[in-house]
Image: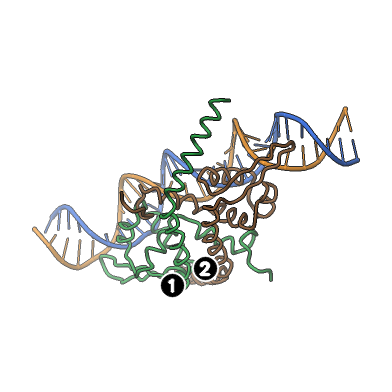
Chain colours: A brown, B green, C orange, D blue
Amino acid sequence: MAAPNVYDSACSARDALELIASKWAMLILPALSRGPMRNSALLRKIGGISQKMLTQTLKDLERNGLVIRQDMQTVPPHVEYRLSALGNSLSEALITLDRWAERHSSDLDAARERFDADHRARTETA
Amino acid sequence: MAAPNVYDSACSARDALELIASKWAMLILPALSRGPMRNSALLRKIGGISQKMLTQTLKDLERNGLVIRQDMQTVPPHVEYRLSALGNSLSEALITLDRWAERHSSDLDAARERFDADHRARTETA
DNA sequence: GCAATTACGCACCTTTTGGTGCCTATAGGT
DNA sequence: ACCTATAGGCACCAAAAGGTGCGTAATTGC
């Protein structure tokens, strides 16, 4: 079989990439890297996420073996989510990306302003 | 000012994260890491991308200072895209992710099969 | 005995994303 | 004279992502 290649749209590595190329996955997995968390805790930690997206993304991550869901079978419900070994190995790479975003967000902001100013200037003189 | 934090939906680091949490950005930037490429070369290299998405993503990456667009001003058009220093630092992290996807895609596949089989079993016995 | 809590499922609706076909301009090949 | 290659722009349409409100079940606190 051919070596997995993300540039091949028919390769399952591409599916894997699409799974992790989601802003919610990129926040949820790193959030779980310090230990298990409950639904409500994740909801509080991850600003702007809706209950629906959290549930949906967690289920998808669980389905792909990155997250383990532990239902305490109590009422009211108590469910904990934690990383699998696989999920943990991924979350390290994601944390790197998150930190990159934090470190360089101002660079991106500045570049965007320059680009837009430049673009405005061009259309004015055009 | 507060330190940039991707978990805060109002922080510009979140915008940065959303920019790079795109499957096309995660393929285009690494593709450019070995040197400049033309539109048509990228189109060939990145399986499944449409001309529209390539143009759109490249423009967005250029706007945010990650990619530099060099128009040779000839007819027929000759345009080259290359990474800025900023884009290069990001592409390293993205390459790590791409490689993770390639290395672990089969693990994800296996987990998905297990999950789905399990889920089918449960709904049958329910 | 009434309300709140918890972790969702479901249906409905809006917004965003992405695909496709058609257009441009000009040099070079046949 | 005509077709091709090049790097897109633009408009229209289909599909997917995401938000919101409503319901559920039993136990604990008031």
Question: Gap between marks 2 and 1, in whole Å?
Answer: 14 Å
Residue A15 as seen in the image, left or right of residue B17 = left
Mark 2 touches mark 1? (CB < 8 Å)? no
The 10 Å Cα crowd at callout 2, few under 14, some 14 to 19, many 20 or more, is some
Q: Which mark is residue B55?
A: none
**Residue nearer the viewer, A59 or D10:** A59
The residue where tag 1 is placed is B84
Instruction: Check disc 1 and report its element: helix, strand or loop.
Output: loop
Compared with A77, A30 (above or below) is below
Q: Residue furthest bottom?
A: B85
| Residue C11: image location, x then y, percent | 59, 30
User: Taking D20 as reference, is A90 left or right?
Assistant: left
Q: Quadrant of residue A109?
A: bottom right
Rendered-image quadrant of the C terminus of chain A:
bottom left
Where's residue A106, x and y in %?
Answer: 57, 70
Q: Tag 2, which secondary structure? A: helix
Q: Is residue B41 left or right of residue A68?
A: left
Q: Nearer the viewer, residue B82 or C22?
A: B82
**Residue drawn at x 43%, y 68% as measured from the top left:** B67
Quick one: label 1, few (<14), some, or many (20+) residues within 10 Å? Answer: some
Please, what is the three-letter code of the amino acid marked with disc 2? Arg
Residue at far top of view: B125
Q: Nearer the viewer, mark 2 or mark 1?
A: 1
Q: Write down the quadrant of residue B37 in the picture.
A: bottom left
Chain of the residue that carries numbered disc 2 in the rendered image:
A
Please state the total of marks drawn on the protein image: 2
Q: Are marks 2 and 1 in one subunit?
A: no
Residue picked out by circle 2:
A112
Chain letter of disc 1?
A: B
